[in-house]
Image: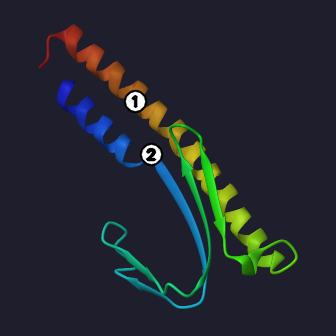
Amino acid sequence: MGKLADKIFDSLKAIQELQIITVVGKVTVSNIFDPGNRQIEIDPDQQTMVTSINLVQGDITSGLDKAFAPGQDDALREFHERQVKLGNDIINRNLKLLKEMATEIIEIAKQEKKEGLP
């Protein structure tokens, strides 16, 4: 199970941060239907809200353009907050699925070892 475990570990390291970005203004998206190659270009002068969640340490960092200060554009700020909550819900669901998959993989590996399979 060494090589498989290494691949799983490398994959988990690569997905340790979730970023939610809300932009009002000019945004260019390339390869929109190809998530592995999707590129998002945000004009530097655009108003943005960014939240970064470190999934390992649990740190949450948010940055808001002054245009989204309380009382300025509450609807967009609330939208961004809903996106952050949705992101958390998705991560929790995916972690549960990963745990179930890991448990199954471990059980299969134990069974194969018990049966003397390579």
The residue that mark 1 highlights is 102
Image-quadrant location for residue 8: top left
Left or right: residue 4 versus residue 105 is left
Task: Decide: is 71 above or below 56.
Answer: below
Q: Tag 2's secondary structure?
A: loop
Q: Tag 1's secondary structure?
A: helix
Q: Which amino acid, mark 2?
A: Gln
The residue that mark 2 highlights is 16
Task: Decide: is 46 above or below 101.
Answer: below
Q: Which amino acid, mark 1?
A: Ala
Sequence-earlier tag: 2 or 1: 2
Q: Position of residue 62 (x, y in %)?
A: 64, 60
Tell me the mark number nearer the camera, choosing from 2 and 1.
2
Q: Which mark is residue 72?
A: none
Residue at the right extreme? 71
Crowd tier of the residue under label 2, counting other residues whose Cα lies within 10 Å: few below 14, some 14–19, many 20 or above:
few
